[in-house]
Image (cartoon, rainbow, N blue to C red):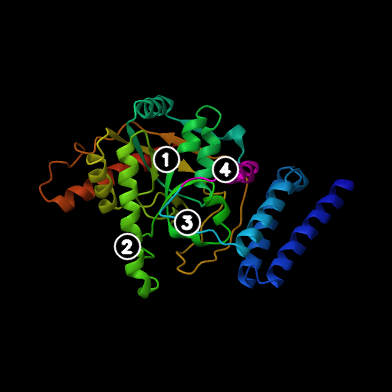
Amino acid sequence: MEKNLKSKHSTTSFLAKIESMAQQELISEKFKEILKQFFQSYEATLEADGISISSYESIFITFLERLEELARSPYTFQPYNERIRAPFDYYQFGIDFIKPLIDMRHSSVRGEINLSSIIWHLSQKHNVILLANHQTEADPQAINILLEKNHPKLAEEMIFVAGERVVTDPLTVPFGMGLNLLCIYSKRYIDHPPELKMKKQHHNKRTMELMSKLLSEGGKCIYVAPSGGRDRPNKQGIVEVAPFDPQSLEMLHLMAQKSGHPTFFFPMALKTFYLLPPPQTIQVELGEARVTKRGASHLAFGPEIDMENFPGSSEKDKHARRKLRADYIWKLVADDYTKFPE
């Protein structure tokens, strides 16, 4: 009874705090409702697994405090954002927030031999680019959580190529501040609104220049989702790995060749969909609903990809050849994805 009363008191306090932020116009009415729904689903999913929200109430209080602080003094992401660990440790905050949602007992990391190869390349100041699928806004934190026990340095220093929503949506900003991010506008949003298209293109060009600079330093591990977006369910409700963009892969390949350091490409499949499923359809406007669940997360690292020699590499037409390469790499990731437990 006392535990339930404490939980109800915590819920009331959180919701009152959210309401207060809206009344002060620190968040919009739209984001107020999204935040309330997010907290209620976070609370419900933990308690459904027998985990009292009171065990984690401090992390949600911290989340609200960060949102309020950032509403009063907004943070501007640079094209390359280096994780912030002081005076407030945003990296650890993201880990602590997402970790209760991951059932570590049933989670898995496959391809340890390939992971060992990745670690070795990085130790030699070689670069590694992980070509992966993308499922939720919490993918970077989930990857870090799954790797932190055996490969903490890789987890902490990994660089993520992120879309604009990670750095513009008020609810995701505190999490993005704890990551090494190369911030880019994806193709599906670059024309919205039309008057900002040129500015966004200039931003993307600057981001690519910074990626080239990072690769020229050597020893960098960069996560890229060549799909340019998150995986979504098909008409049968089955989540499918989204197709990879041939032009994005070609650009990465060219940058790697010019880096001045050996750069190796590895496929990586991940399964995190339950954490924060995206909307059924792509939304142009900011402010998507967030409903979370608790469950297992999975990673699989495949063998190194030969970007020059692959099925169809003898194709004369360069556009067709790039498409064949993109489809080949996509299949490597998709095949590993299908092997994850349901």
Residue located 37% across and 25% down the image: 120
Q: CA distance from mark 1 to mark 3?
A: 28 Å
Q: Which mark is residue 77?
A: 3
Q: Type of residue at label 1?
A: Ala
| Residue 203 screen position, x and y as percent | 36, 60
Q: Distance of mark 2 from mark 1, alpha carbons? A: 31 Å
- Residue farthest along the front direction in this orientation: 87
The image position of residue 54, as x and y in percent, is: 78, 46
Secondary element at tag 4: loop
Q: Nearer the viewer, residue 80 or 279?
A: 80
Residue assigned mark 1: 269
User: SS class of the residue under badge 3?
Assistant: loop
Query: Which residue is painted at 61% across and 70% down in the image?
Result: 30
Q: Which residue is mark 4?
A: 85
Tag count: 4
Residue 255 location, x and y as percent? Answer: 26, 45
Q: Looking at the image, is mark 4 or mark 3 earlier in the sequence?
A: 3
Which of discs 2 and 1 lies nearer the camera? The answer is 2
Identify the residue shown where x is 34% and y is 49%.
Answer: 210
Residue type at mark 2 is His
Q: What's the CA distance linking mark 1 and mark 4?
A: 28 Å
**Compared to 101, does 23 lie above or below?**
below
What is the magenta range?
A: 82-101
Name the amino acid, label 3. Answer: Phe
Residue of label 2: 202
- The answer to whether marks 3 and 2 mark residues whose Cβ atoms lie closer than 8 Å is no
Residue at mark 3 to residue at mark 2: CA–CA distance: 15 Å
